[in-house]
Each structure stands twice: as structure tokens, then as C-alpha cells.
Amino acid sequence: MLLTACSDETSPEKTPRAIRAVTVKSEVVGETFSQTGAIQPRYETPMSFRLDGLLVFRVDNGSTVRKGDILATVEKTPSLINLSSASAQADAAKSDVALADITAARNWELLAKNAVSRAQVQQSDANLQAAKSKLEVATSALASAEQTLSYTDLKAGRDGIVSGVSVNVGQVVTTGQTILTLSSNTELDAVFDVPEQMLSEKLDDTDVEVSLISNPALVTKGKVRELTPSADTATRTYRVKVTLEGEMEGAPMGAAVNGKVVLSPKRVFKVPASALTSRGQDQAVFVYAPETKTLQVRIVKIERYAENNMFISEGLADGDIIATAGVSKLRDGEAVTVEKDERS
């Protein structure tokens, strides 16, 4: 009877072990390099006229302009005279064509009546063709005169700001002489001079964090777009231009900035070193599976260690829940409950 009573008793269910765990999220780490530079316009264009003339108007230095705005003007009188002459010649050529056309048509009518010779008809046709050719020449000359008149106004090719002036009103300027400099104020670069060691890094299209030295809270991102292939003869540094992707309000051209870049970046997961275990020759961690509420051993690759943490480059994914304490007592497939690790 005693043996029967003992066999009827049921053993209590084993309570799942409680573990401490962290939820991991990947981050980019690497060696950080910083350098001081300056804000410069991406486009800085010396503006000049296509003809000689007396300067009668020029915008002031520092003026903000839009594409198509007039920046400077030379005296228009000579160009207007040429335009008037070309217009008169074009009108005269049109009249000559009209007269030659009437004459040729009349001669063909008279030829049908045997009132004129065929030679006279041929001559009138030739005169008509000559008049048309002269009209083409006069029309081209008129178009050239109109274009020359348009050259008396120096217009902005893009939005920007006048960053420098070279001549004043009243001066006689020549073709190609720089009148002023137009700098883009919407497309800006952060320009840095970096040492030769940086050339060993792949800087093309690298993300750069740029902050204003006078206001470190003003931060934007940029990408390396240009790296000079030769060093400066005096400083032996290489110029790097970073295109700013965001606006830096209140950052004037020439403002000092600090550029920060992560060299040899790699996406890793920061995990407490106490989570490390092993399986044979491989390093591993225990990953909690919420679906089954059990632990699974995951083989990982550790990139490096730092203080009480390790950085894992392979084997994990964002959102994985990693056991961080007592891993020597845990087993693959073990049912557990999860407590949050304060280090997460």
C-alpha cells in the first residue's frame, strides 16, 4: 500500500531559470580622426564682360543675387548704334528682295508674250537670288548686334553672393577682365588640409560630421567629394573638400569648422564581456528565443574588447536578446525567463 501511494504522487514542474539579458543594436565603430577646416563655396566664379566698355553700374560687394539678375553694366550707346545700323540694313535688304521678286515675276509674264528676252529673265532671277543672300547677311548682322547689346549686361549664372569686386563704376573695362566674383551660397563645402597618412584610408564618399567651432551645437553631415592628388608645396598636406548635405544657418563663408570622420568603420554589436561562452574552439553567446522562451547557442566573431565589453562583428542581428550573467551554468535549449540587465 505504501509503494502504491508513492507511485501515485506527481513530481512538481521545474521553474524556468531567470536570466539577465540585454537587447543588442548594431553601431558603427572605428578610429576617430578630427581636423579643423573652413566653410567655402563650392562654386566661385570670376565674372567678366565679353566686350570692352565704360562701366556704368555694378552691384555692391556682399550682395545676394538670383540667377538672371544684372550684376554690372557697361555703356550701351555704341551697341545701340550698331544695332540701329544693322536693323536699317536688314530693312533695306528686305525691300531689295521684295523689289527683285516683283521684277522677276513681271519679266516671266513678259517672256510669255515675247516682250523680253530670256537673258533679261535670267538676269532678274539672278538679282532676286543676290537680294535674298544679302538679306540673310543683314539678318545675321542684326542678330549679332542684338547679342552684342545683351553682352552689355553682366548677369548671374546661378543664385549666390558677390564675394569680391575688382573694378569701380567709371572705369573702362576690357573683354575678359574680372569685374567681380560670384560665389554660391546654397552649395557649400567644408575644406580641410589633411596629412599624408590619411591617404591610406578610403575617403571617397566617406561620411563626415561637420560642426561650427563658434557654435558646436550646429552640426551637419557631409561626404568627401574631392581629394587633391598632390601635396601643398609649403605644408605638405592634401586638400579634402566635403560637400555639406544639410544647411548650416548662421555659418558665413570662411567660418572655422571641425570635421570628424570614423576611419575603417565597421558595424558591430556592443555586448557585456560576461556574456561570452564557447563551443569547442569557437566563441559563442546565448541568444534568447521569445517564440519558444528558450536559449540558443550562437557562434560569434569578436572584433575587439574594450573595458568590460566586447564588440561582435558577426553572428548577431539587431534586436537579439543576449544572456549576460551566469552563462557557464546555462544550457542550449534551456527554458528561461528574462530580466533586464541594467547595462543595456
Image: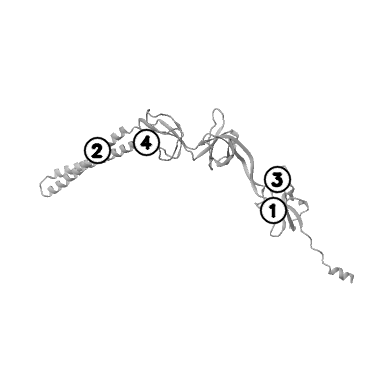
Is residue 31 visible in the rendered image? The answer is: yes
Q: CA distance from mark 3 to mark 4?
A: 67 Å
- Among numbered discs 4 and 2, the one appearing first in the sequence: 2
Earlier residue among tags 1 and 3 = 3
The three-letter code of the residue at mark 4 reads Asp
Give the mark toward the camera: 3 or 4.
Answer: 4
| For the residues bearing labels 1 and 4, Cβ distance under 8 angstroms | no
Q: Secondary structure at mark 1?
A: strand
- Marks 1 and 3, Cα distance to the nearest angstrom? 15 Å
User: Identity of the amino acid at label 2?
Assistant: Ala
Task: Give the farthest residue toward the right.
Answer: 2
- Point out the frontmost of discs 1 and 4: 4
Label 3: which residue? 310
Residue ID at (73%, 46%): 273
Q: Amino acid at mark 3?
A: Met
Which is nearer the eye, 8 or 315? 8
Mark 3, secondary structure of its residue: strand
Q: Residues within 10 Å of mark 4 (few under 14, many from 20)?
A: many
Q: Secondary structure at mark 4?
A: strand
Tell me which amino acid carries mark 1: Ile
Among the 4 quarters of the image, the one containing residue 143: top left
Residue 253 in picture, x, y percent from top left: 51, 35
Colouring method of the image: one colour
Tag 2 residue: 88
- Which residue bears the numbered disc 4? 153
Q: Secondary structure at mark 2?
A: helix
Q: Identify the mark nearer the N-term, 1 or 2.
A: 2
